[in-house]
Image: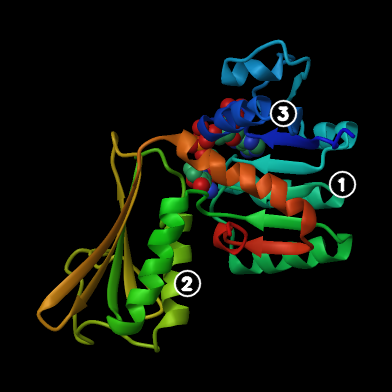
């Protein structure tokens, strides 16, 4: 008996993450690449993005064209924050399960996309981070916040990143907020001599975004207590490190209904 392959469309296929996704899909015999989308894509073989030509799949500049013509099961999106929300909506409209790696979604958008997925009876995922190590860093940070509630987050990314703070730091901040009692940290009379010096404010604590060339993706969660600090740190060095997570998501999302926010909910 032959099992049906999962049909995967990739948005942002020409990008740094998208290329890795195209490669991962082409290398997995249980998956089938049915569309590769990027605004600048001409009529090229989709595999050229990942250095694996002759796939027979043409790249497309239009997501709607790709979704309407391919009967995809899943859309994997690594594009830009400005495009991701509309891409997710369009995907759901065509009954294609969106797996959104692109960061920058607002809580209202996440809620709306969840409703749309439920109406269609399909699963969907927004995952600010697909790396297993980063998920563990977030879980450990939430656990530590129960005992050491004074915390600040420092995240480091390359200087071309569009959104700040990173989706991972927002997700970490949300998990910390759920785990600890409400707390307004720091001196209530403190003043910023230079605007922004204390970072972004989130539920009583601060998130600092460092943007520098040469940096890939790192995050440090720093806890302070009486006479001690605890630092939980995760470093990503390579985009391929996200692909096992994306692969798990593509397979598991087929059995879900509604939108899941955070890869940690489906990784086990
Ligand atoms: P990138 O290299 O700049 O690639 C962006 C891709 O999006 C390109 O294919 C680009 O196509 C396409 N694009 C640009 N503008 C678009 C638009 N208006 N509509 C549709 N597509 C558009 O970016 P990246 O480094 O791959 O990162 C992509 C996203 O993934 C970012 O939001 C990043 O923060 C996120 N990310 C998430 C994770 C995770 O684990 N969830 C990990 C790393 C990165 P052209 O080449 O034609 O311009």
Using the image, determine if residue 124 lies above or below residue 186: above
Secondary element type, mark 1: loop
> 209 or 120: nearer the eye?
120
Pointer 1 residue: 94
Q: Is mark 1 within 8 Å of ligand 1?
A: no
State the colouring used for the structure image. rainbow
What is the C-alpha distance between the residues marked 2 and 3? Answer: 37 Å
Residue 116 place in picture, x, y as percent: 81, 62
Using the image, determine if residue 65 lies above or below residue 251: above
Q: Is residue 265 left or right of residue 205?
A: right
Using the image, determine if residue 16 lies above or below residue 207: above
Residue 65 place in picture, x, y as percent: 84, 32
Who's the residue at 21% across and 69% down the image? 230
Q: Residue 142 occupies which quadrant of the picture?
A: bottom left
Who's the residue at 30% across and 39% down the image? 215
Pointer 2 residue: 174
Near mark 1 (Cα within 10 A), the count class, few <14, some 14-19 or many ≥20, is some
Q: Residue 262 occupies which quadrant of the picture?
A: bottom right
> 143 or 215: nearer the eye?
143
């Amino acid at each position: 008996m032959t099992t049906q392959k999962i049909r995967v469309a990739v948005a942002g296929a020409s990008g740094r993450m998208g290329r890795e996704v195209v490669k991962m899909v082409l290398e997995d015999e249980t998956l089938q690449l049915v569309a590769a989308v990027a605004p600048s894509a001409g009529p090229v073989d989709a595999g050229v993005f990942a250095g694996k030509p002759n796939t027979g799949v043409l790249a497309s500049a239009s997501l709607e064209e790709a979704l309407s013509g391919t009967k995809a099961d899943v859309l994997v999106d690594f594009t830009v924050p400005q495009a991701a929300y509309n891409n997710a909506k369009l995907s759901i409209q065509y009954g294609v399960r969106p797996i959104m790696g692109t960061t920058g979604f607002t809580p209202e958008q996440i809620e709306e996309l969840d409703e749309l997925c439920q109406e269609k009876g399909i699963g969907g995922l927004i995952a600010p981070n697909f790396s297993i190590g980063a998920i563990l860093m977030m879980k450990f940070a939430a656990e530590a916040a129960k005992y050491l509630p004074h915390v600040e987050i420092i995240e480091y990314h390359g200087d071309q990143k569009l959104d700040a703070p990173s989706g991972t730091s927002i997700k970490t901040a949300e998990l910390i907020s759920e785990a600890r009692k409400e707390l307004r940290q720091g001196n209530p009379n403190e003043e910023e001599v230079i605007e922004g010096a204390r970072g972004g404010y989130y539920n009583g604590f601060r998130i600092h975004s460092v943007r520098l060339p040469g940096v890939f993706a790192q995050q440090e969660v720093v806890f302070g207590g009486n006479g001690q600090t605890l630092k939980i740190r995760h470093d990503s060095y390579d985009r391929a490190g996200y692909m096992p997570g994306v692969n798990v998501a593509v397979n598991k999302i087929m059995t879900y209904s509604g939108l899941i926010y955070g890869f940690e909910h489906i990784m086990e």
